[in-house]
């Protein structure tokens, strides 16, 4: 194939796709069956190969020669056109039972005419290669397989320790110059490591106790005040914000910042508009003194606008530190030999050309990773690209060089990412599905799936530092781990996308789309674009119509919008109406998009899907996530024979359509809702042998015969790693318990399963397979709402089980020896890997007996809640237990287990639990109820734990005394939640004042909630002197409180005195006071 000849040229991978289509069986049969000119076909292929032979030379010369660049663009446009035609023919031929029937309706002359036009166009380009001085060249293919540990974790940071210490010092200083909040700007050139430094500071453990909370907000070039304010609220709360009014957003943010000492990082700020900055910073002043804003920017002018302290200028790394970055990513051998010495010498020369930019060193190091041939390194050092100015290649030459040496298939995949906005956080699996839809993934000759090929491509780009892991991951809700491109890498992708990739902030009638554009993305949609038919007409060859980021308003304000898009853009491979909230239906013309491979209607309001959708032969991915009004899939879904991914999570599909077993390419299916009829019953799962990942099987009560469950062939589905089996919990009319037992027995999954949940099961016992030690990969097991089971399965011999949750088993009374080992197993440790064990909502559970003294050797968390009849003891030897929580177990009479490693202890409404020994390493204690509070204070007095950091006491009616009048020195947070509290029993005013001041000396936070304070008689004022660590305390008094008082904190900087009116509370944080 041509790819072996043209090496790194971008178009070579595209030409491979065209050659594969030409060689396809369907296309050959189509040509021969209709006596079309075989010579024409050969002429097309020959012309493409001759053109392909000069692509490598053309790609290098296009940077400085605009004529070559235009030549390449025209050539690429012609190849796109050829590929569209061949894909059309391929699809039509594949969907016709008889090729000749197809041609009776579709003129062969039309195909021939289009092919002739394409050949003429390509030949005209070929004639220009001599005048452009383009040479045929063969270049070694630099493709390599990414090692399994290629994803860098960001832990190796060189040369920034002093910078980090300097920034932290600025954050800890009171440098506010009279204002509540200080702004610390970090200024440096692109790629110097500003974001990395800010991340190092942000994640420093020493700041945890200093600030009440931290938030990270990426700003980027578009300085949208409303959007940024909204993002800040989401970063603080970790939840989506639905407000769209700036005034309401400001009020909400002010409420979140009120009386808090915070650190907010604003990364990558570009604005030089003082008015915009003034709007952003308005809410910050509700925070307390010494709150900080850490801001990164390339612009000195931006820094001068925002700064309240001196700007911190981040310089380039030294050559030595830059070399360390390079070596870390290049994996240069530490062995001393002649080859290594030579490579080290060349490498240091390469590093000098990186000009101290860690991003450039990282990128080039990643490119040469595992490539330790001296010739390869010399080629990099002596490349002509180094001689180009940054303005000539539009990016740092080192980054352009990294791209130049990418394998062809990775070049196309990387440039596709120019559709993402700057700083956009993208998911790995989502991008792979888009690559697949655009034919960017080459079919493997080794039997790997396209998805597996995509994972290899993605990991390769990560290892070469084109992608990097995001620390924020869209605030971690509700998405998985995300990735992001550095600004300069994003600029590189954008510059390479040229006329063929177009990214619009708002798609409207003024949008300028070129006729060559094939891929379009947008972050806002204005349906006025459809009023300008020239815009749609110029975009008629679009392959990609991709919505990015959530829409904040309904995008469609006329009925024709969806029809125009679907009817005019006939070459679409990717169509995304994701987040088009007002989209309630699709036109029937959707079925004419025969090239379509990816359709996303997630978070739309579609109520039904047209039957014509099932004509989309090439459709690979159908995303219907969170379509809340969609309850039914089209009846002819079985016609989508190439469908690989069907996302229907959070969509109320009542039952599956008929014939799902025909979708034998299907890999991802969120759930299968069992129907009541044979054609959509559970046995349809039997044909879906390629399912992988997570699967839920719902409405299992619709299985009428156990043999149907066997036909689902769950044991054959070796790629499913997470399985949920669910019977509807609101169907209480089931009485055939034996049928449910038989069904669950026959739904036994493959031994590769990692996670299993069983919900709503009405059988009277669990099948034996659940505790089979052959399930060596199972790490999580959850049993919920299994009302008729009176005993648990034997689970102790599952060798890898880490998480076990058992809840709402209403008839379970006893957990005995059978829980640990079955009758056939008498040796080995029970639950050898279990780390988390939880029981809750067990109203009849009375006894936990027959403890195995060697069981639970690595248990870290034990949680028992709402087990009102549980009596007796808990397991008595848990050597590594770190967290113990017992809630609402009123009859439980037990001593704490022997667990010297406990760090967190929580006991609520379980007043009979005995505290004979308190672990010395405990860090957090929370108790509720007078007996427990008294027992806990006695234990603290006797043991005096040295690591206690947080103490919460609730509902105690008697006085609480601390040993020696002081809390443990390690304590940082103290919470009281009760109406009557006496700190030290009976003492006079002076004694009370002295002891309370001593009490608060070490605290960082001090809260007293809903209290009638039993202060010493006539105690009108509390004065806390020099409590340097106390940055937040709260005294919220009952409205019935009759005694007024004054609260005062005094230090060397302030002498505030705020009186507490009767019945009101005072909140204080740092040196700021507010009356409620």
Image (cartoon, rainbow, N blue to C red):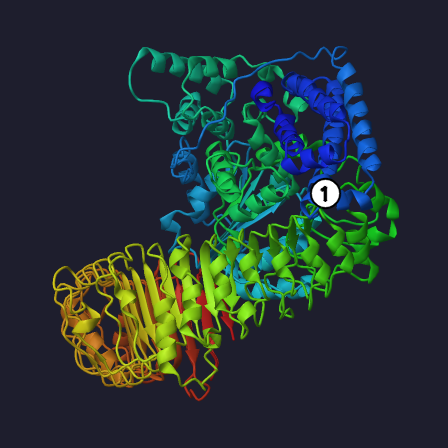
Q: In the image, what residue occupies the spot 37% across and 59% down?
A: 715
Q: Nearer the viewer, residue 822 or 906?
A: 822
Horizontal and vertical percent for residue 968? 23, 64
Q: Name above or below for residue 869 compared with residue 282.
A: below
Q: In the image, what residue occupies the spot 52% across and 40% down?
A: 454
Q: Nearer the viewer, residue 84 or 425?
A: 84
The answer to which image quadrant residue 58 occupies is top right
Q: In the image, what residue occupies the spot 12% across and 66% down?
A: 853
Q: Nearer the viewer, residue 277 or 213?
A: 213
Q: Name above or below for residue 364 compared with residue 546.
A: above
Horizontal and vertical percent for residue 766? 30, 73
State the SS at label 1: helix
Q: In the image, what residue occupies the spot 37% across and 23% down?
A: 332
- Image quadrant in which the N terminus is located: top right
The answer to whether residue 1021 is visible is no
Residue 283 left/right relative to 972: right
The answer to whether residue 200 is visible is yes
Residue 587 left/right relative to 548: right
Horizontal and vertical percent for residue 120? 81, 23
Q: Nearer the viewer, residue 726 or 85?
A: 85
Label count reads: 1
Residue 709 left/right relative to 773: right
The answer to which image quadrant residue 1068 occupies is bottom left
Q: Name above or below for residue 682 compared with residue 484.
A: below
Horizontal and vertical percent for residue 699? 49, 74
Q: Name above or below for residue 619 compared with residue 16.
A: below
Disc 1 crowd rating (10 Å Cα; few below 14, some 14-19, many 20+) is some
The residue carrying mark 1 is 99
């Amino acid at each position: 194939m041509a790819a072996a000849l043209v090496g790194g040229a971008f178009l070579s991978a595209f030409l491979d796709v065209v050659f594969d289509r030409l060689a396809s069986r369907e296309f050959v049969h189509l040509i021969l069956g209709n006596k079309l000119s075989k010579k024409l076909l050969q002429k097309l292929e020959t012309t493409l190969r001759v053109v392909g032979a000069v692509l490598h030379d053309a790609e290098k010369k296009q940077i400085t020669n605009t004529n070559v660049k235009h030549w390449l663009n025209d050539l690429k446009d012609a190849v796109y056109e050829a590929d569209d035609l061949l894909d059309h023919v391929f699809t039509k031929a594949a969907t016709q039972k008889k090729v000749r029937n197809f041609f009776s309706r579709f003129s062969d002359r039309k195909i021939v005419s289009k092919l002739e036009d394409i050949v003429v166009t390509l030949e005209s380009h070929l004639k220009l290669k001599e005048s452009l001085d383009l040479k045929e060249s063969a270049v070694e293919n630099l493709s390599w397989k990414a090692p399994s540990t290629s994803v860098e974790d960001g832990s190796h940071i060189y040369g920034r320790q002093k910078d980090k210490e300097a920034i932290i010092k600025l954050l800890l200083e009171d440098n506010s110059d009279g204002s509540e909040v200080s702004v610390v700007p970090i200024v440096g050139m692109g790629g110097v490591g500003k974001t990395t430094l800010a991340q190092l500071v942000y994640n420093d453990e020493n700041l945890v106790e200093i600030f009440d909370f931290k938030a990270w907000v990426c700003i980027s070039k578009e300085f949208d005040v409303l959007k940024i304010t909204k993002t800040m609220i989401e970063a603080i709360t970790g939840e989506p914000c639905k407000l769209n009014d700036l005034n309401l957003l400001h009020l909400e943010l002010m409420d979140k910042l009120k009386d808090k000492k915070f650190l907010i990082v604003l990364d990558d700020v570009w604005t030089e508009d003082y008015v915009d900055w003034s709007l952003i910073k308005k809410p910050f002043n509700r925070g307390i003194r010494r709150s900080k804003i850490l801001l990164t920017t390339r612009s000195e002018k931006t820094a001068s606008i925002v700064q309240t302290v001196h700007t911190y200028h981040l310089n380039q790394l030294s050559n030595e530190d830059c070399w360390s970055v390079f070596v870390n990513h290049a994996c240069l051998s530490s062995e001393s030999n002649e080859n290594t010495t030579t490579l080290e010498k060349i490498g240091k020369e390469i590093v000098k050309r990186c000009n101290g930019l860690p991003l450039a060193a990282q990128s080039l190091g990643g490119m040469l990773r595992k490539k330790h041939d001296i010739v390869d390194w010399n080629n990099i050092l002596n490349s002509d690209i180094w001689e180009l100015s940054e303005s000539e290649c539009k990016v740092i030459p080192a980054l352009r060089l990294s791209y130049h040496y990418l394998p062809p298939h990775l070049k196309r995949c990387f440039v596709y990412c120019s559709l993402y906005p700057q700083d956009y956080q993208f998911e790995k699996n989502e991008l792979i599905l888009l690559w697949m839809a655009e034919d960017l993934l080459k079919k493997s000759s080794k039997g790997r799936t396209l998805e597996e090929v995509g994972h290899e491509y993605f990991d390769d780009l990560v290892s070469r530092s084109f992608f990097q892991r995001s620390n924020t991951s869209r605030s971690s809700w509700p998405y998985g781990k995300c990735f992001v491109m550095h600004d300069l890498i994003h600029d590189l992708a954008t510059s390479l996308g040229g006329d063929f990739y177009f990214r619009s902030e708002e798609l409207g009638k003024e949008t300028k789309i070129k006729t060559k554009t094939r891929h379009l993305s947008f972050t806002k949609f204005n349906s006025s674009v459809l009023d300008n038919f020239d815009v749609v007409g110029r975009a008629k060859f679009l392959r990609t119509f991709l919505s990015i980021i959530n829409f904040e308003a309904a995008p469609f304000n006329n009925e024709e919008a969806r029809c125009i898009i679907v009817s005019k853009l006939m070459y679409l491979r990717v169509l995304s109406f994701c987040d088009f909230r007002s989209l309630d239906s699709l036109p029937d013309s959707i079925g004419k998009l025969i090239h379509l491979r990816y359709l996303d209607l997630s978070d739309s309001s579609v109520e039904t899907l047209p039957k014509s959708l099932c004509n989309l032969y090439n459709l690979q991915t159908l995303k219907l996530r969170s379509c809340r009004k969609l309850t039914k899939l089209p009846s002819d879904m079985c016609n989508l024979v190439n469908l690989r991914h069907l996302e229907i999570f959070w969509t109320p599909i009542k039952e599956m359509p008929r014939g799902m077993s025909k979708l034998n390419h299907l890999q991802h299916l969120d759930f299968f809702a069992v129907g009541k009829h044979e054609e959509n019953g559970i046995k349809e799962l039997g044909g879906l042998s390629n399912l992988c990942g997570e699967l839920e099987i719902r409405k299992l009560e619709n299985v009428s015969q156990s043999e149907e469950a066997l036909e689902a062939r769950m044991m054959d589905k070796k790629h499913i790693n997470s399985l949920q089996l669910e019977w509807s919990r609101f169907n209480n009319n089931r009485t055939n318990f034996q049928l449910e037992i038989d069904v669950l027995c026959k739904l036994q999954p493959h031994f590769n399963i990692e996670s299993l949940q069983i919900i709503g099961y009405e059988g009277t016992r669990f099948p034996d397979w659940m505790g089979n030690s052959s399930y060596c990969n199972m790490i999580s097991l959850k049993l919920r709402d299994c009302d008729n089971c009176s005993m648990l399965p034997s689970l102790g011999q599952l060798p890898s089980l880490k998480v076990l949750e058992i809840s709402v088993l209403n008839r379970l009374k006893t957990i005995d020896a059978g829980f640990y080992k079955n009758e056939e197993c008498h040796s080995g440790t029970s639950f050898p890997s279990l780390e988390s064990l939880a029981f809750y909502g067990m109203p009849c559970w009375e006894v936990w007996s027959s403890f195995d003294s060697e069981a639970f050797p690595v248990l870290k968390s034990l949680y028992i809640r709402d087990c009102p009849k549980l009596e007796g003891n808990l397991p008595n030897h848990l050597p590594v237990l770190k967290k113990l929580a017992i809630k609402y177990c009123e009859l439980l009479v037990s001593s704490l287990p022997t667990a010297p490693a406990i760090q967190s202890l929580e006991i609520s409404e379980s007043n009979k639990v005995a505290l004979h020994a308190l672990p010395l390493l405990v860090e957090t204690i929370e108790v509720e109820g007078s007996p427990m509070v008294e027992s806990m204070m006695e234990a603290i007095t006797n043991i005096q734990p040295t690591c206690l950091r947080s103490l919460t006491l609730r509902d105690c009616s008697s006085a609480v005394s601390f040993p020696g009048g002081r809390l443990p020195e390690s304590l940082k947070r103290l919470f009281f939640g009760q109406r009557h509290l006496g700190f030290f029993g009976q003492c006079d005013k002076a004694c009370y004042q002295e002891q309370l001041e001593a009490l608060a000396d070490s605290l960082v936070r001090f809260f007293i909630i809903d209290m009638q304070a039993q202060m010493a008689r006539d105690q009108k004022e509390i004065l806390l002197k020099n409590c340097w660590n106390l940055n937040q305390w709260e005294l919220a008094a009952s409205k019935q409180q009759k005694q007024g008082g004054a609260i005062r904190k005094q230090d060397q900087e302030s002498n505030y005195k705020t009186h507490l009116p009767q019945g009101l509370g005072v909140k204080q944080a740092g040196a700021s006071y507010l009356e409620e």
